[in-house]
Image: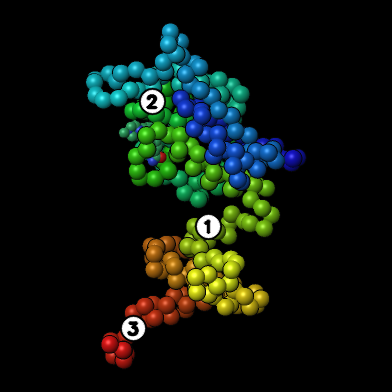
Amino acid sequence: MSDQAPFRVHILTLFPEMFSSVFSASMLGRAREKGLLDIRLTDIRAFSLCKHHNADDYPFGGGAGMVMMAQPVADALREASRDLPAAKKIYLGPRGRQLTTSLARELAREDALILLCGHYEGVDQRALDACIDEEISIGDYILTGGELAAMVLVDCVARFIPGVLGSQDSPEEESFSDGLLEYPQYTRPRIWEGVETPEVLLSGNHARIAAWRRRESLAATQRLRPDLLLSAPLSDTDRKILRELEAEEMPKEESPHVS
Ligand code: 4H7
């Protein structure tokens, strides 16, 4: 248990059963047990006023699929808002602002979040216009529903809630926080299938290890995501290492080579 008030997330969906394993396992499960994260789920169908509890209907203008009706969605959002009046109301959809580390850090500073998951062809635009503060996308690809996007957002935001990561870890130390890709990791056994762990990691020399890791981060970023180097904060030493790596990668024309 913790004395800090939990970060509250209320998720509205037609498929609440999709969330149980993701929110019970590993770090998110532990964060909830520790009282750092309070996740509520509402089945939008419960707000349907129809005989058969439908919350979707055919699209006006025709076309394939179903559209989630304005009334049950808006009623569900308004009830969630009465409970969490300061919460930011987010719709997960492909037209939204893209989720990044910096957006996740911002969202973790909100009082609470209400997440609306669209399914089928999405939600009637009038309910979105009346109730939603912001649409967020987890990336440029299409999903069958907003539920997986909501899970990704909660996972990503939870890492910025104090106490969710172990006391050793800092969310700022990892990839995309310092603007570089991560260095490779090794654990026992020291030799696996004949492949050795880099000797430096067994040296116990913390300065050498830190220097090796920084070099590996720079090398991976240069090779795999050179675009990140344009905005990463780099020291003079970093720039010198990058020039060395570049020279290794691209040997000079006149340098001798084995054929
Ligand atoms: C809201 C609006 C999120 C939710 C539209 C959701 C990608 C993302 C959805 C849709 C999502 C993301 C309607 C988009 C049907 C696809 C064929 C559910 N897809 N749909 N279209 N990138 N899908 O964050």
Tell me what residue is drawn at x 38 percent, y 19 percent. 56
Residue that appears at 39% across and 45% down: 139
Marks 1/3: CA–CA distance: 32 Å
Can I make out residue 106 in this image? no
Relative image position of residue 78 (x, y in whole percent): 53, 21
Q: Amino acid at mark 1?
A: Ser
Q: Quadrant of residue 54?
A: top left
Which mark is on residue 251?
Answer: 3
> SS class of the residue under badge 2?
loop
Dot in front, 1 or 3: 3
Q: Which mark is residue 206?
A: none
Q: Is residue 71 above or below residue 225?
A: above
Q: Residues within 10 Å of mark 2 (few under 14, many from 20)?
A: many
Q: Quadrant of ligand 1?
A: top left
Identify the mark nearer the N-term, 1 or 3: 1
Q: Which dot marks residue 177? A: 1
**Dot 2 corresponds to which residue?**
123
Side of 30 where 195 appears, left or right: left
Q: Is residue 89 left or right of residue 166?
A: left
Q: Position of residue 41 (x, y in %)?
A: 55, 28
How far from the left and from the top, in percent, is residue 116? 47, 29
Mark 3 falls on what kind of element?
A: loop
